[in-house]
Image: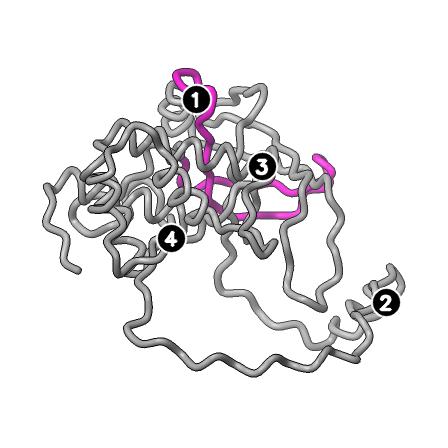
Amino acid sequence: MYVSVSPDVWALARGISAVLGETMPPPARTITRAVDCLGPDRARALLVQALTVEAQGGLTLPDGRRRTLGGVFFHLVRASDKISREDRGSIFPPQFGRNGREKATSAAPTPATPAPSTSAPSPTWAGDDYRRIIAALQHETGRATTVKITVIGRPGAAVEQGQAVVVALVSEKVPDLPKGLPEPPAGTRYTVVVARKQWTKMAEALTADPADAAISEGYAALDSCVEGISVYATSSCCATCCAPSRDGGQGRHANGAALGRMKRGSDVRQ
């Protein structure tokens, strides 16, 4: 379904799609229709609300699965009492599901109910197991050509040092991981170093909106002096101002699709 909108609506919709991680055409078109119907201010407010809900634990589907960040946004759009039934129908046409994605044109056959799994659950990795695995890899270590990490959250105090500003965040909540992976330790400390020019714009937005979130992407390095990970930000912005540029680039945030979910306190993706 083609959506014809103004360049400003298109640019904001691209930015929101990037923050939500909903960059595939069907959900991206739904977001564009939402921005067009709701207007920029309301669309930004719902984005911040979705990030806030996700930071507080998110929402679940009727079957118990957790909604994606994009799913939270679509749910809030549907539940908004500030849009008419007609606008709601324009944003989510009949051929679209409740998650903002296009329904299949034909019904798929009902799959057979799988037999209950008889395999034992994946064992928890002990510290000795992990050390043994790392030791076995020492002589055949590959080379990383690109290392990039994204940290999302609200920093506390900020310390200025020359042309840089340093903030600290702690990631308390461990995200859902694929089956078989060991659970990583929680409470990792991230010290983020941001260019003063980028921080000035972020600080203004964070002060103006207590629900907004800072987004920094950059190079991560293990730093013993901070007892955690240092992140040297190559780009930083806020959730409500990460719209890509109209020339097709990704604007102030180079990889909005990697933002994914925002967890309690901070969200870290690498």
Task: Report, in whole angstroms, how far the alpha carbon at label 4 lies from the one at label 3.
Answer: 28 Å
Task: Report, in whole angstroms, how far the alpha carbon at label 4 lies from the one at label 2.
Answer: 44 Å
Does the segment drawn in magenta span residue 234?
Answer: yes
Residue at the disc numbered 1: 206
- Please say if the residues under marks 3 and 2 sit with CB atoms less than 8 Å apart: no
Tell me residue 222's x, y (percent).
66, 47
Q: Is residue 62 left or right of residue 17?
A: right
Q: Reading the chain from its start, which is encountered first: label 2 or label 1?
A: 2
Identify the residue at image location x=69%, y=77%: 140
Helix, strand or loop at mark 3: strand
Residue at the disc numbered 4: 98
- Residue 266: give its label: 3
Q: Amino acid at mark 2?
A: Asp
Which one is in front in this view, the residue at disc 4 or the one at disc 2?
4
Task: Report, in whole angstroms, how far the alpha carbon at label 2 lies from the one at label 1.
Answer: 43 Å
Identify the residue at image location x=77%, y=67%: 134
Mark 2 nearby-residue class (10 Å; few <14, some 14–19, many ≥20): few
Q: Amino acid at mark 1?
A: Leu
Q: Amino acid at mark 3?
A: Ser
